[in-house]
């Protein structure tokens, strides 16, 4: 009889615990992020500063300071797990030409065209500004500015232009990092 009482007591304790907490537990203070929208002003400021490099680099003239915001909201995630994602692109001297090595294949996603950049002033620049883990396929080393992470993809055939633009963007990101406290 003692064994049955112990088993019944365990079942009652487990049932009481399940009934007492019908909602998921609140996140710990360390993992409770702020609203993802709070990173947007910092991301816009970084993009505006990079777009303003058109004053120093002719290839950057005409760069739009508009930021494409992407909020990855998944219904399986809890509201406090929303994350901020945004992307900014600029192309100069880029064109598309037919790819002579293209072979049509119904199971391939390859394009019949390939991108060509002007050898002197052509460039393709993409900034990814996000929070949390990198979801892309490329291995990257992001620059962390508080909770915001920035990944820069720069493609320029002119090595001098690439080095100068790389240094200018790195200077912008470092100055922003110095002004934003760590999380």
Image (cartoon, rainbow, N blue to C red):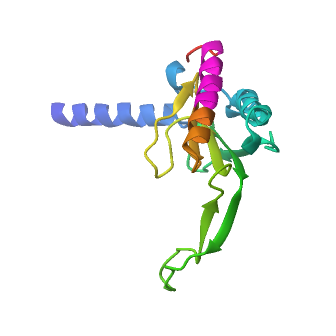
Q: Is residue 118 above or below residue 6?
A: below
Task: Please provide percent x and percent y for residue 91.
Answer: 71, 52
Q: Is residue 175 magenta?
A: yes
Q: Nearer the viewer, residue 121 or 2?
A: 121
Task: Please provide percent x and percent y for residue 24.
Answer: 53, 36
Q: Is residue 84 left or right of residue 109?
A: right
Q: Residue at 58% of width from left, 26% of height from top?
A: 147
Q: Is residue 121 magenta?
A: no
Q: Residue at 53% of width from left, 19% of height from top?
A: 29
Q: Is residue 82 visible?
A: no
- Quarter of the rendering occupied by the N terminus: top left
Q: Is residue 8 visible?
A: yes
User: Is the magenta region chiefly helix, strand or loop?
Assistant: helix
Q: Nearer the viewer, residue 7 or 87?
A: 87
- Quarter of the rendering occupied by the C terminus: top right
Q: Residue at 76% of width from left, 41% of height from top?
A: 58
Q: Nearer the viewer, residue 123 or 11?
A: 123
Write down the region rendered in magenta: 167-179
Task: Please provide percent x and percent y for residue 5.
Answer: 24, 32
């Amino acid at each position: 009889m003692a064994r049955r009482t112990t088993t019944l007591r365990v079942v009652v304790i487990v049932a009481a615990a399940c009934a007492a907490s019908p909602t998921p537990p609140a996140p710990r203070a360390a993992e409770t992020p702020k609203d993802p929208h709070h990173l947007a002003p910092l991301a816009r400021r970084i993009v505006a500063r990079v777009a303003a490099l058109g004053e120093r680099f002719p290839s950057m003239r005409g760069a739009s300071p508009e930021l494409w915001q992407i909020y990855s909201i998944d219904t399986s995630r809890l509201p406090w797990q929303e994350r901020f994602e945004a992307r900014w692109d600029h192309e100069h001297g880029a064109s598309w030409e037919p790819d002579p090595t293209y072979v049509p294949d119904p199971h391939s996603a390859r394009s019949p065209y390939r991108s060509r950049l002007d050898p002197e002033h052509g460039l393709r620049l993409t900034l990814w500004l996000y929070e949390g883990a990198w979801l892309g396929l490329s291995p990257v080393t992001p620059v962390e500015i508080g909770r915001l992470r920035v990944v820069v993809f720069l493609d320029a055939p002119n090595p001098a232009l690439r080095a100068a633009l790389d240094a200018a963007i790195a200077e912008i990101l470092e100055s922003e990092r110095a002004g934003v406290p760590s999380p």
